[in-house]
Image (spheres, helix red, strand yellow):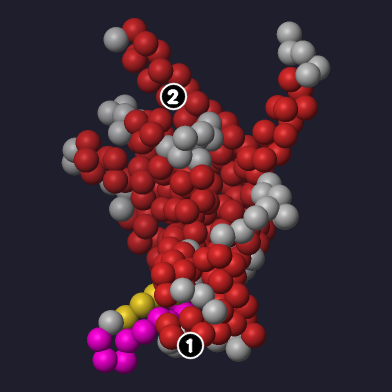
Amino acid sequence: MVSTSQKPRQKVEEQGRFFVPVERSRRRPEAIADRIKDTIRANALVPGDRLPQEKELIDRFKAAKGTVREAMKALETQGLVYTRSGPGGGAFVAQPSARHAMELLGNYFFFDQPSLPDIYAIRKMLEPELAALLAGNVEADDLARLERTIRIYDHPPADLDEQYHQRIAELDFHSLLAELSPSPLLGFLCGLMQNLLRELPLARQIYADPAPASREEGLLFQHRLMAALKDGRSDDARRITSDHMVAAECYMIAKAAEIIEREASG
């Protein structure tokens, strides 16, 4: 039984994991990095635009060279800045990529990874709505990209290596749908869940399983969804994707149980 004296501490720890106090003390490089971001916004700089030279930043912020360099390095790590050496070199505004942002967020879960049910709980909520939004709104070139992805796994694999890559390509199909989302936030969240699943060690073991689920079942889903997307049938696209998410979750959890049991007995 947990004593009442332990509960407040637990609550604070849980809150602290997800929320950073606004009034926390900030290191000088972090503060300068934020001011450089403000400079980018205030001057309406866009990817490819040159940032002020290092000496100008040192004078502007009255900071040491090492402090300014640490701030710039932090922005480079965040994907907001890139540097180029040689004639015409310097620091430039970068276009942050969704993949880079997902990798950074994925590191947050490195030591406390979400479970398969955690990931699918969110996928079941978001991906049917994404499919409904896309119905009737996918350009011909993008439909062709989706069809090319399907062709990666529309035939029996030659070996286990090809089988694994086919399974990943099935997930890539969903990631491409996320990339095409008319809502950038919805697309990013769907893509993040797919990336977490792709990097989950247990999921990787399932994808490498020599006895996967029927490939035809997955293909049937995707062909039905493609037809709904082309025809603009939003309700059908939502229902097809919802049914697929439920089936995929059941399959993944059942396979995970098999793997865990096999490892425990072996």
Instruction: Judge whether 247 appears above or below 75 on screen.
Output: above
Q: Residue at x 48, y 87 (%)?
A: 56
Left or right: residue 148 versus residue 99 is: left
Range of the magenta residues? 86-95
Identity of the residue drawn at 43% across and 24% down: 255
Q: Amino acid at mark 1?
A: Glu
Return the x and y of residue 67 as percentages of the image width and height: 46, 69
Is residue 94 in the magenta section? yes
Instruction: Give the number of the disc on residue 56.
Output: 1
How far apart are labels 1 and 2 at the CA level? 56 Å
The N terminus is located in which quarter? top right
Q: Quadrant of residue 16?
A: top right
On-image quarter of the C terminus: top left
| Residue found 59% across the figure and 34% down from its top | 118
The circle on residue 135 is none
Q: SS at mark 2?
A: helix
Residue topped by disc 2:
256
Give x and y (percent) for residue 248: 51, 35
